Amino acid sequence: MAVEFVGGALLSAFLQVTFEKLASAGIQDYFRARKLNDKLLNKLNITLLSINAVVDDAELKQLRNPNVGAWLDAVKNAVLDAEDLLEEIDIELYRCNKLEAKSQSSATTSKVWNFFNASSSSFDKEIESKMHEVLDNLEFLASKKDILGLKAVNSGFGVGSDSQMLKKIPSTSLPVDSVIYGRDVDKEVIGDWLTSDAEDDNRQLSIVSIVGMGGMGKTTLAQHLYNDPRMEGKFDVKAWVCVSQDFDVFKVMRAILEGITGSTDDCRDLNMVQERLKGKLAGKRFLLVLDDIWNEKRDQWEALQIPFNCGAHGSKVIVTTRSLKVASVTQSTRIHRLEELQEEHCWKLFCKHAFLDENPQINSDAKEIGKKILRKCQGLPLALKTIGSLLYTKSSLVEWESILASEIWELPEEESNIIPALMLSYHHLPSHLKRCFAYCALFPKNYVFEKEHLILLWIAENFLQCTRHNMCVEDVGEQYFNDLFSRSFFQQSRKYAMCFIMHDLLNDLAKYVCGDVCFTLQDEQSNNILKTTRHFSFLENANKSLERFETFNNANRLRTYLPLCLTPHAIPWNLPMPSTLMEELISKFNLCRVMSLICCSLDNGLPDTIGNLKYLRYLDLSGTNIKRLPDSVCSLYTLQTLKSRYCRCLEELPLNLHKLTNLRYLDFCGTKVRKMPMHIGKLKHLQVLSSFYVGKGSGSNIHQLGELNLHGTFSISELQNIVNPSDALAANLKRKSHLVRLELKWNANSDNSVKEREVLENLQPSKHLKELSIWSYGGTLFPDWFGVNSLSNVVSLELRKCENCVLLPPLGILPSLKELLITGLSGIVVIGSEFYGNESSSYPVIPFASLQTLTFHSMIGWEEWDCKTVTGAFPCLQKLSITNCPNLKGCLPEQLPCLMTLQINYCKQLDCSVSSASSLHELHLTDCGKLQFDYHPTTLKILNFGGHFIEGPLLEWINHTLSHISLESLVIADCPTMNIPLGCCYNFLRSLNIMGGSDSLRTFPLDLFPKLQTLELQSCNNLEMISHDSKLDCSLTSMSIVWCPNFVSFPKGGFSAPNLKYIGIVGLENLNALPESMQTLFPSLFGLSIVSCPQLDSFSGGILPSSLKRLILNGCSELLIASLKWAFGINTSLETLCIEESDVESFPNEGLLPLSLTFLLIFNFPNLKKLDHKGLCHLSSLVELHLSDCPNLKCLPVEGLPKSISTLIISGDCSSLKQRCMKPNGEDWGKISHIRRIIVDGIINYNF
């Protein structure tokens, strides 16, 4: 493959695939063998080459010339048509080769060949006709390039006048703004490092790289650091250079020299400049900022760095870049990634530019629009500044709402720096990465995705180019993904480990550059797929599931059908898929490469016609209710990925699965499949196999694994079925060097411990393994390979329910082990020196040198832990957890310098002391016997304790600790004798949860907890009230008071909590009033739950906050329910209302419920006889109605239900109503036949 220049156009990646197919031996041989017009191939190749010559110019010019953009889109679709055609030939050749091989071994050879020749002739004519059509289209488009003024340019960035719009004004050392918002911590951390006298590994020069996506504020932060007063006197020499895209060693070096001397240098020789710079830096401590570096070539950086090495120790360089790879190339001592700004800082920055005041006095409507715009900018400083400045010139709310509704690309070019900043990153991508990035337009905003999932999609779409024969396509995908991540196109998800997310503005960029090729359908959009759409995704909404299929009238070219969910690993819906509809989709998706039917309700199974999708490479059936896969699946010769995760009804895999010779990924975990198909070992390309079950007796086919080169995670179950231990050896696990995680599972502990040990001995994994988990192993001892040579790279080890085991292996010698879990090993009585491993090691080692997390759980027989015979163990241990070990008595390890979390629960016999752990941050103690502490941890931030068996000395220690440290989170559970000292102020506490403790607590003083955000008081039997005497706002965001029988009041006059989002009050039988003035004092309240509070008869002040969206009333008085009529003002936003346990006979009264309601639950109304139509008919936004346990409700209103309802759920004791709503003869069926989805006792019925 030709070398690809950085900045190649997106279309070049499409063309590259077509060029490679045209040059392939298969395509060339096909045209010659069939005596077709091979001139067509040459003409197609030349036409594509002429287009390829101008695509770089076109990609830049499309930003200003929509006609060029339309031409590019047309060319892109014509090229994709050509790619489809060439791939059709490839598939036909593969089919013919299969047929030929079959005919040579068949007795009916002549009949097969007659059929073969007849079908081939027809196919050839069709191909030739399609080729003419594709060629005519491309030649027409190629003829228009001159009219559009497109010219051939050298590949690469910055060629031509149109590239100038993407170039930045060079930065200088002077900051534009005197204040930098939200970067105090970043500035402090980097500033401390810059001014520190401590040497970094005795380096002559230390480098910090500030990394982040475009517009994140890297340059601004560097400017403020450069001008920080702390730098004065620390450095002899300072210089600032804006490097930008053109990294020329000579120019950059001369710019540094000029920055130091303050004068222009006219030297034209690199050596002379190098010598001069060396002289200026020699023996001096310097600070150098290199802003906006893009260069990823190490040799160029090393050439630039030569004079730097002459400076004095303590010299520092600040690099700003968008790429982690740049940070690596510069050999940065530290890498500091900039994150998005927090909301409060976003608001100040936005207001500074929109109102020239960071704390403006504005009306609520403008503030609400401004907050929505804030969310749109998603913490990106450049976007906040740009849109804020734009709004400064707009005086009316109508103009503000117009900006809010606009896409970022619709903003005026002359007033927006966002587009050039983001396009700059995009244009620096090689074309193959541009195509992979543009494909991510399928993901909606805030979509959290897994690396493996995205790579599998790229593979299926044939986006990945293998440049080395020894590199598999999955590794190429890993490389592509890491490249995009390092360039800040992807970000690590903060919420979900091992998942990623795209910034909203980069998501906008992907949608912009891909055009109509990718289409993501969302609820607010019209159902409209264009003929040019190739890739389709949608966020599923069960209420609109049937409408989705109205969009496929133009779907004949579709390559991707991909339903998505915003929550990773979730299976949130059950999408109906009648067999007729499934057949229709398959007939339309004949070019489909990726088909996901996750969570579809396939009551009639997957149709045999699925085998007609000859292009299909990726099929995901996860979460469906299929019981079997049709045999026709085995004719999908191009299939690479087959997923059936959590198909809980799936009982078997097809017998001919081995015919899927291109299969690379097979995942059926969470199914009933327990029998492996025969010949699975013939799947030579199989990389990932989720599970393997060992058959019984002669069916023990574990030897088939020996033929597979598996990658990633692999699980072998039912190992007790192995009769001859030598069969386990044939699995050849030791040579599977690409396995990362391995699970070995027995179904029960065996009586034959000798045989079980031999089996495990023969299942020795590769030394490259990272994670190992062993379940229910029946041996008394572990094999010898549990040592440094075999498990030297293992970082995580789990031993679960190995109940026969009496001695732990020498795990302390494993040099890479970071996480160790030992649970359910009830046969272990003593953990002694053998655990540390010094006896089995030929040389002294530090036991558990790398271990960070150690967990013992349910070790019922464990009595003693010998910690004193070994010194220096666990030097890196950060978390120690011992739970449910009721007989453990002895000591705990001492000298744990890195211990941050200690958890000891339900160890009632424990009698020992905890020595100093200088880094202890988190402590969990429940029924931990006579455990004592020899010191008071000043670093403790989180304390959870409880239990009826906590001894007095420990309680005294806890009381002292609470009064003398800056705790942030405290939980007290089931400890009635424990009381919080109220003689001090808890200035740092943010979360407090008291459950069944503190019997002496009668008044909870909020004033002592000024920073408290989460408060939960549960089963505090003597608690009477909450007090708040201060006029200052409290910091609460969530407050729950549950089953406190003597609680009677909140602070008199109310208390201000502007950030309070949730209130829950449950079982307060003597409470007769809610907090006062909630509508003004709780302006952010989102959810309110009132359960079993019979004395409450009205909402305090009569009106609830307009921000309230969710309200639950359970077991409340009829007066309280009736007061709903006056509880909402004009601007109510209530969407969800759940009313439970009421004795009324008719509900709801006219005007009781607000118009904004979208969900209504009526639950446990034993006397309800009538649903009042007058109280329901005005609810034009109501989408879902749930009726449950209303035994006396005999029918629905005569007038029917609101037409807006798309989901009706009837559950529990509603027997009469269920009968009347039966389809099609129920007496009330006519009233609900318009409702799309009706669920009765969990059974879903859809109305088409």
Image: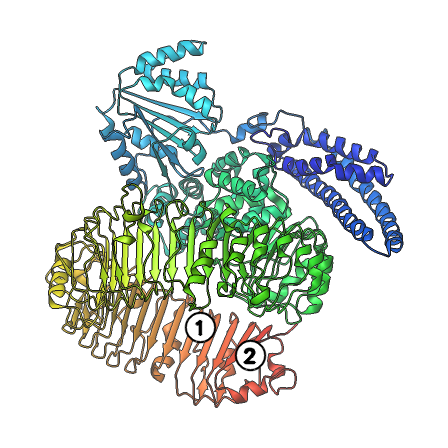
On the image, the x and y values in percent for residue 779 come to 40, 62
* Relative depth, front residue between 1175 and 722: 722
Q: Quadrant of residue 1108?
A: bottom left
| In the image: residue 171, left or right of residue 552 | left
- Residue to which mark 2 is pinned: 1201
Give the residue at mark 1. 1154
Quick check: 573 above or below 918? below
**x then y, percent, for residue 3:** 60, 28
Look at label 1 and name its amino acid.
Pro
Task: Judge whether 459 appears above or below 804 on screen.
Answer: above
User: Which residue is more in the foreground, 996 or 222?
Assistant: 996
Relative to residue 165, is residue 771 drawn left or right? Answer: left
Residue 460 seen in this snapshot: yes
Identify which residue is drawn at 47% across, 44% down.
490
Q: Tell me the kind of residue under disc 2.
A: Leu
Dot in front, 2 or 1:
2
Q: Is residue 766 left or right of residue 350?
A: right
Q: Residue at x 87, y 51 (%)?
A: 113
Secondary structure beneath disc 2?
loop
Considering only vertical position in the picture, is 1164 above or below 1245? Answer: below
Mark 2 and mark 1 lie on one chain; the one further toward the N terminus is 1
**Residue 1030 seen in this snapshot:** no
Q: Nearer the viewer, residue 901 or 276?
A: 901
